[in-house]
Image (spheres, grey):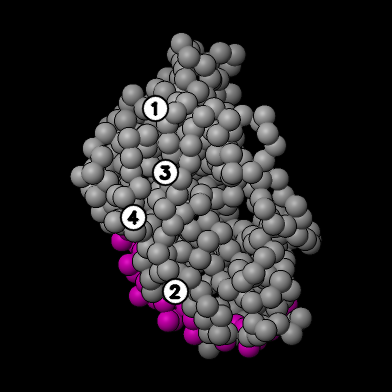
Amino acid sequence: MEMELEMAAAYGRFGIAPEISVHAKLAEERVSGEFVRMNRIREANQLKVISAMQRHRVSDTHFSGSTGYGYNDRGREILEEVYATAFGAEDALVRHQITCGSHALALCLFGLLRPGDELLSVTGKPYDTLDEVIGLRGVPGAGSLAEYGITYRQVDLDACGSLMPNDICAALNDRTKLVFLQRSRGYAKRKALLIDDIAGIVETIRAVKPDVRIMVDNCYGEFTETREPTEVGVDIMAGSLIKNPGGGLALSGGYVVGKRELVELVAARMTLPGIGREVGATLGQNRLMFQGFFLAPHIVMESLKGAVFAAAMMESYGYEAWPGPFEPRGDLTQAFELGRAESVIAFCQGIQKASAVDAFVNPEPWDMPGYESPVIMAAGAFVQGSSIELSADAPIREPYTAYMQGGLVYEHAKLGVLRACEEMRRRGLLGTKE
């Protein structure tokens, strides 16, 4: 009882009402079994990463950086070998010069597709930031895939957010050169793909068109399960280092892993043909990228525990949470359907107020480049835009859904949810959707 009083007082310093702390205690007890299961995933992935580092004889000599052209940067080469081994792939590019996850994905698309080819997305429309890359919208002349004569089609998910194998097979044709899957839910009300989902659809596609290349947008998915898409037949995948695999330490960057010949094509797009991966000074970033990758299995599970708690907590107030607290998870993202714009804004502003960095900032919706609707983004991060750190964001459009992700430590994610609930309570919004 004494400890409970101390904890109530501790949360009280953040202005959190006792009634919210009571809800939190019950929610935490409800999902305690899920936490045990997640610890097993963390342990398996931690051993996988350590094994890869030992196999490639990682040494402190690999932590120093190169300058200028970056020729013969052995640390960079070993880091890429570690990524390839840990993700069950032949080769990898891991570079801080890749500015974000969307940049990594665009490098793959431009590197692997040629005029006359077709890109087929089988998880519906990709995340908003790829719209202008594909040519679905944007300023003419900017150099989209469409302007290079690369066509695009998509197969939508079914009403339950699941893949449609028959429709996918029917959509494949002679021009289809790249099949694209987005693992995470993005801003759509759909399930994140699980590894078994990906393995099944890869087998189905190969039976119809064995030579087609299959690519996965793996953002937010790394280390959420004990296998990665490249371990179940995917040709190439990409993601961001300021999400899961950077472990909260990488200052910038992205990765591409997959078949060697495809990674080489992407490397030629990253720099230029004839030079490819041979250049790219690391500028002292190697140690942070190595250490972040080492920490990533643990950090990802801290974040996922926060998401599971958040789902249980918001359900206790009557909101729909997807995924639910006991559903399997293929990404970090936790969504809540809050029903009104004011609730979304209050939730995100509450997350900001729980931050260790920039807690005094009050985020507001704005017309963010690359997005169709105004977006509110809450993030008090040590690394700008790092979504492995606690953050929340939402497009201000119906059905007014808030998306939460990240949390380097579970306790911070928990605090963020409680502070978000408190912000909604103060505005008379908590427990109401209309």
Which residue bears the numbered disc 3?
Answer: 120
Residue 356 location (% of width, % of height): 68, 58
Please name the amino acid that badge 3 sits on: Leu
* Residue at 37% in and 63% down: 162
Is the C-beta separation of discs 4 and 2 under 8 Å? no
Magenta-colored span:
14-43
Which residue bears the numbered disc 4?
Answer: 167
Residue 43 location (% of width, % of height): 32, 55
Which residue bears the numbered disc 2?
Answer: 324
Instruction: Name which of mark 3 and mark 1 comes first in the sequence.
Output: 3
Residue 10 location (% of width, % of height): 65, 75
Which residue bears the numbered disc 1?
Answer: 263
Dot 2 surroundings within 10 Å: few (below 14), some, or many (20 or more)? many
* Residue at 62% in and 71% down: 399
Residue 166 location (% of width, % of height): 29, 56
Residues under labels 4 and 2: Cα distance? 28 Å
Please indicate, yes or no, whether residue 290 appears anywhere in the rendered image. Answer: no
Residues under labels 1 and 2: Cα distance? 36 Å
Near-viewer residue (254 or 35): 254
Near-viewer residue (176 or 355): 176
Is residue 380 rendered magenta in the image?
no
Instruction: Name which of mark 1 and mark 2 comes first in the sequence.
Output: 1
- At numbered mark 2, what does the secondary structure look like: helix, strand or loop? loop
* Viewer-side label of 4, 2: 4
Instruction: Name which of mark 4 and mark 3 comes first in the sequence.
Output: 3
* Viewer-side label of 4, 1: 4
Near-viewer residue (196 or 423): 196
Dot 4 surroundings within 10 Å: few (below 14), some, or many (20 or more)? few
Is the C-beta separation of discs 2 and 3 under 8 Å? no
Residues under labels 4 and 1: Cα distance? 29 Å
